[in-house]
Amino acid sequence: MSTNDQNSMADATVSAFASFANRYEKGTGGATREIARKLMSMSPTSTNNSKILDNATGTGIVIEEIQNHISSANPSNDIRIPVIAADAAQPMIDNLNAKLKHAQDNSAWPNLSPVTTHTVPAENLDSAVVPDDSITHAYMNFGIFFCKDPNLAASHIYRSLTPGGTALITSWHLLGYLDPIRKTHKTLYPSEPTITMPFSEQWEDPSYVKALLVKAGFDEGKVQVTQQDTSMRYASLKEAAAMFTEMFTTMLLGPKGWESPEARNDFQERLAENFKGSGNYSDDGMDGVRVRMVANIAACTK
Ligand SMILES: C[S@@+](CC[C@H](N)C(=O)[O-])C[C@H]1O[C@@H](n2cnc3c(N)ncnc32)[C@H](O)[C@@H]1O
């Protein structure tokens, strides 16, 4: 793919996140939050000297989990940590700002202060937003692979970390929904090319993730990439199929969308059938349904 094609795909992805921002958390089925909790368990203990960066913050799931983690580890509430949160999509930041206002009005994030939010792509996170050697804990949960220039984004993370600071950066190792979606698309649109995600498949490979982070400045011996299972969870198969049909409309059909409500329903129903036949789908009865996902988690120290 040419650089121009890559750049327009990255722009289209940010627009897709922007238009889906209000439904984003329901769409993830809790998978990114579950991995964010895992990142907390892997993070060095926070102190009053900590300073946090959350890149590709989305609606601030990682920030909420930081607050939950600090308050459960430190019930006396004597810690105050500044947080810088950034995302390329303004509606994601609008969502986070609304949460922040609610948290301030209700003293719900007592350990995070101040939280500053920025609509800026991770590639442009220069020292005016995040000074050199200033961050003790940097997070980028499922964002780096959407960047036009992931290496530049990782270089800014490295630049802004204090010596000894930690970065936790994730990508997907396995996308349990992809085969059912591809199969449904192939059946209904056989002459169309097989659909591809808006990021390189190389991100599945832990050694690719590690090499990129080493190129960005981290010492080879200070980057460890591990895998972690998680699931996207929905109340029912019908809800899961409807959610994936909505999330993937632009990727499947481009901006023109479905040719008719019937075409959309047909896709949704076949997708539900294909989920049932997939090894990455399970029905938990009263607890709903889930689609298996596996994350790559890169833990890096400067
Ligand atoms: C899958 S969401 C992850 C959100 C959040 N970190 C979480 O754990 O749920 C990906 C986010 O990356 C953002 N994004 C896409 N390209 C970006 C870029 N170049 N720089 C920063 N954020 C970007 C999107 O707007 C979206 O909010």
Image (tube, rainbow, N blue to C red):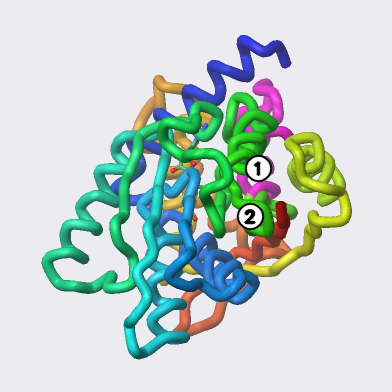
Amino acid type, residue under disc 1 in the picture: Tyr
Q: Quadrant of residue 92?
A: top left
Q: Secondary structure at mark 2?
A: strand
Mark 2 to mark 1: distance in Å? Answer: 8 Å
Give the mark nearer the N terminus: 2 vs 1: 1
Q: Residue furthest bottom?
A: 75
Q: Which mark is drawn over residue 167? A: 2
Q: Tell which of 102 and 8 is nearer to you.
A: 102
Regarding residue 173, the answer to whether it shows in the image is: yes
Residue drawn at (18%, 72%) of the image: 107
Q: Is residue 291 left or right of residue 211?
A: left
**Does residue 206 sit above or below 149 in this rendering?**
below
Q: Quadrant of residue 194?
A: top right
Q: Tell which of 94 and 221 is nearer to you.
A: 221
What is the magenta range? 178-200
Q: Secondary structure at mark 1?
A: helix
Q: Quadrant of residue 159?
A: top right
- In this figure, which residue is indicated by the disc labeled 1? 158
Determine whether label 2 and label 1 are within 8 Å by CB.
Answer: yes
Q: Position of residue 108 (x, y in %)?
A: 23, 73
At label 2, counting other C-alpha atoms closer than 10 Å, the crowd grade (few under 14, some 14-19, many 20 or more) is: many
The N terminus is located in which quarter?
A: top right
